[in-house]
Structure formats: structure tokens, C-alpha cells
Amino acid sequence: MGYILGIDTGGTFTDAVIIEEKSKKIICKAKSPTTKENLDACIDAVIEALKFSDYSAIEMVVLSTTLATNAVVEGKGSEIGLIVIGEEIEEELPTQNYIVVRGGHDAGGYPAMELGEEMIRQALHSFQDRAKAIAISSYFSIRNPEHELRARQIVQASCNLPVVCAHELTTQLGFQHRTVTAALNAKLIPFFKELWTSLENVIRQRGMTCPIMTVKSDGSISRIEHLRERPVETILSGPAASIMGAFNLTGKKNALVVDVGGTTTDIALIKNSEVKINPEGALVGGWRTRVLAADVCTSGLGGDSYLKLDSWNAHLSVGPKRVIPLSYAAHQYPALTEELFWCLSDPTPVVLKQKNDCFLKVRPPQAGDRLNSEEHAILAQLDSGPRSLLRMAQNLKIDPDFFAYDHLEALGIIAHISFTPTDIIHALAESTRWNCDAAILGAKMLAQRMGKNLDEFLRYAQSRVVNCLANAVLQAVINNEGQDYDLSAHQKDVIVSKILREDQNTLLTCQAQLAVPVIAIGAPVPYWLPKLKEIVDFKLIIPEHTEVANAYGAATGNILEKLDILIKPNSELGGHGVHLPWEYVLFDDFEEAVAFAKKEAQAHVRQRAIDAGAENPQVTTQVEEMAVVSEGVKIVFEVHVKAKAIGRPMRWQ
């Protein structure tokens, strides 16, 4: 009997499941806190927590991860050299280390000018000392990639560095976004080589000799070896795995997936058994890429979102900052409860910060951190465990409202602990998994500031979280319908305010209704989603194993490869040009051009699916003509030959 291990590393927890390969039944499951500073450790910890008896029986490991997302958002990755061919790019790029050289093509695939080969050779001399990889992007390379291919030959003849060509990553128009995609991919190659090697070592040390797969941004899976040169394809791996997990746990052909994690809520649509794909490509860290990705609407709302009162004690904001919940921190460090009790009774006024703010030292400072004397003093206070901001401020004789922790937190030396939606659940005793007393103490401090009793504050805080969740769901639905409407900008609109229950003293109430069911996944959803139904009416589905749906989505994924080949008349030379990703071919006869494109597309996606690990992939093709009829004659001006290969990973003995 074969087994598959699925692992998802999220911002808060790393989840794992082992499923039986044929039945897809979950044999065991586990969760472990994600240690961002040491991912090997949390992967190893969650595998240990599974308590599986024979890891040598695992036939495949599939990983979904936020590694690429976090690396892009945080600006990590290696320095690269970027060669831009044919056109200046006016917008910002992910590197300052680039050069523009002569060359490029027009929309028909005809060379606009000769390639500046000597300019490329000169650029390499300036790149070699700094760059760990080279990216190449040429104007209209998706119509004819010959200049990118020639530039790669020049680079490979001159230096031993990984080389990325933009046309190999996407066939979509958009020179700026295609160039960004190539640059980000090049930056991630050396970074991911180390990470994946490290993760492989953890898995091999556990006795698993099977292939290791990764979830891509469109929800499909691929062997790690196949993605070592294309890590940018995994930048939305985690959210994509959650969508596939929701679909595979329920089998619903049409549904809205709402994934509530620790840091964010990710919302996506399943339509006709397929994940809706964003036609513009993935948007990550402010960079618009041309990576084929699930159309996910993400909001900074999760179980660990920071709940913060404004200076007037009138409004409680929810996120987007993530903190460690008081209940969880006090569960790990019981002495923190006593400190919170002291904070509650201390009369010191705090306006800009909060009395329930606490901090934990997570790593020692390093030589390059450049800390001042006050920051070193703060760290000394944390040597024995987490402490409250109020206690440290008094010990160091600092005004608590001007306690400077931001730099230490930004460096990842300390972690912020405070009141969160998770603490609301514990304060109301809806969950007793962690320390309920700490959650109640944190709530009481905020209630004091607002002039409310504990019950009043908790109900208010609960309504704020539900309201933010309603905003996120309704905005995602509006976006999926293609409407350009920012819900947050219309909070004062009468109907919007009625739907979102902004005014409790009203003669009119309104309720939005969703036309598709909601599949809710993530550990907090059994508590929050039923309350959302009081504002938005929908059929709620909370599947069994919802808390590990992401890992299940990874374990049950399929291999999918797609290709879109364009055929257009050549206005310069006559005939019909076939724009293959690797070359441009001209035909006199239209039917021959279409037949050639179909054959090449089928062979290409089939081979890529096999390289990705598929066994006997099924290939389908579709020909879409764009034509006009003039005086009774059909004139075809553009043809798209679309091929798709789908397959299950082959069984490994």
C-alpha cells in the first residue's frame, strides 16, 4: 500500500498529512508552529508529530509553501544581472543591476534591429563580480525568442551562472511584467537551491527516498528538480494548495473557498471544477508578474491579527499586522499570565501603545544589526523570557508610549505578543486549547480603555472581526465578477453600511446572499464562519480535516502543463507565422501552420508533464480562431492553439 506525505508551511503553522495513495484517505495529521528562522526544524517537527510507523513506505512527498511569496515580499534573493533587449523600461525593476542593449522584435516577430552582442559582453564584465544569476528579457520575445536565445549563448560562453530567459517563463504580452518575472525568477534560483537542498536533507534523514514535489501557483504540482530553474512559479503555492484541498475534501464543482489562516484570509473561486486563474498573473510584494496563478483575493485578517485601539479609544482595528496571541504565548510561558495581571492593575496611562503588548526574544543580535544602547537594554530584559512593554518601560525608565521596539521587530530579533481574534475565542471559552486567563486579562485592559465591561468589549471585538471578514468575502466576490468597486471606499454608502451592520440603531437591515456555497478551511473557521452568516447568507461547508486542508491539497494535487501558441499573418514576408516559445516558423499554407502548431504544442506539454513527474499524461488541444467576415468572406487574423496535459504523479517503488 502506497502513502503520500503532504506538507504546508504557512506563516503561523506547518501542517502535515499522510494519505493512502489510492483512496486519498487521511491516515494521520499534525500541526507544528512554523519557525521562519529555521524551516528545517519545523518541517522535521511536524513529521515527528505525525507518529507514522514506516516512513520508508512513503512514495511521494508534496510541499506547499510560502517561501517564494515571503522571499519576494521581503526583498530577499540573490543579486542578479539583468539584460534588457530592445526597449527601455520606465517603471521600477527588482534589481538596479541591469543594462539595456540594442535588439528586439516587432509584434509580428520580425527583428526591429540587430542584437547588440558586444554590448552584452561588456555588461557581463560588470555583472560577474556581483551577480549570482543572469536574467534576459527581449522586446516581443514571445513573438520571436531568437535574441534571448542568442544572448543566452553569449552569457553561457562567458560565465558559469544560471541564465533565465523571459520567453521560457510566460507566453503573455507585457514587456514590463515579463521582465519583472524573469528578474524575480533569477533572484530566487540561488536562494531556493539552498532552501530546497536543506528541506530535502530533512526528508531523506527520515528515511524517505521518494520524489519530492512542490505545489505551483496554479494549484498543480511538479517535481522539485523541474522547478529548480523556475522557482517563481511557486510564489502563490500556499494559497493554491488550500483551494485544491477545499475542492478535494468536498468535491464541490462550484464554490467560494475561504481560507482563514493565522496571518491572512485567502479567498478564491472554484468554477466548473477548476480553480479560477488570474489572467493578469500573480501580484506579489507589489510586483505584477506573468506567473500563471490562482485568482486569490488576500486580506490581512487572520487568527493572529493584531487588535489595536486608536488614540481616542473609539475604534478597534484588525490587522494587517500579525502578532503572537497572548493565550498561546502564556501557554508556552506560564509566568506571562502573572505579568499581565500586574499590567491590568498598574495605573500608568498608555495611549499610543497598549498595556497588553508583550515581547519575546527569538534570536540573538548579529554584528550587522547595528543596535543602539537602548535596544541592547531591551534585549537584556528579555533574556529570561517574554516581558510586557509596561514592565520593561518602567525598569528602563522609558515612557511606554515611546518604547522603541520597531527596529528590533523588523530585524526579526524580537516577536510581538498581543491581543488577537484567537484570544477573543479563548476569552469567551469557545476554545480552551491555550491559556484562557491570559486572553481574559488582555481583553480587560482594552475594555478598561474603552470604558466597557468585559462582556461588552468581547462582543464589540467579535463584531469587528466578523465585519472585517464580511468585507473581505464581499470584496472577493465583487472582484471575481469583474467589477471595479472598492468596498472599503463606500463604507458610508447607505446600503453598504446596512449590509455590514455598521449602525445597530436602524429601521432597515439588509443581507447579502451568495449564489454559491462557501467551503471554509483553516483552524479558526468553525468559530468565525457561522457568525459571518449573520451578515452574509450562504450555504456553509466546513469539511472534516479543515485544519489541515492545505496539506491535503498538496498531497492530492495533479500535474498540469499548458501552452498557448499564436498564429498570425506575417505582414512583412507574407504567409502565416507560428510563434513557438522556442522559435518562429513561417508557413505559406494556413492549414499546415495550424497542424504544425497542434503537433508541437501536444508534444511540448506532454514532455513537460513527464518531466514534472506525470505518468501517461492525457493531452487535449483546442483551436480558437479570431476572424471577421467581410463581404461574405471569413478573414482569420489570429489563431490560438491551446494544449493541456494532465496526469497523476507516477507510482514510485
Image: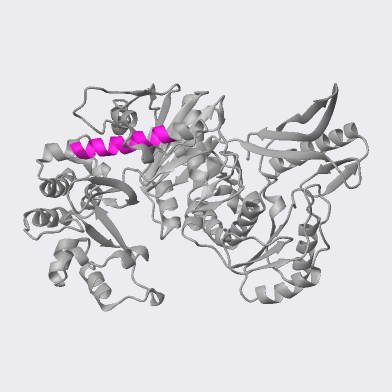
Whether 467 is among the magenta residues is: yes
Residue placed furthest toward the right: 588
Q: Position of residue 484 (x, y in %)?
A: 49, 37
Q: Position of residue 417 (x, y in %)?
A: 25, 55
Quadrant of the image containing the N terminus: top right
- What is the basis of the colouring in this image? one colour
Q: How many marks?
A: 0
Main SS category, magenta section? helix
| In-image side of 229 versus 422 (left or right) | right
| In-image side of 230 versus 547 (left or right) | right
Whether 456 is among the magenta residues is: no
- Which residues lie in the magenta part? 460-475
| In front of the other: 175 or 492 | 492
Residue that appears at 66% across and 44% down? 612
Quadrant of the image containing the C terminus: top right
Q: On screen, 513 above or below 586? A: above
Corner quadrant of residue 586: top right
Q: Position of residue 80 (x, y in %)?
A: 61, 66
Residue 523 can be seen, yes or no = no
Residue that appears at 29% across and 35% down? 466
Residue placed furthest toward the front: 631
Q: On screen, 347 above or below 327? A: below
Q: Position of residue 525 (x, y in %)?
A: 34, 33
Q: On screen, 35 above or below 318? A: below
Corner quadrant of residue 349: bottom left
Residue 183 can be seen, yes or no = yes
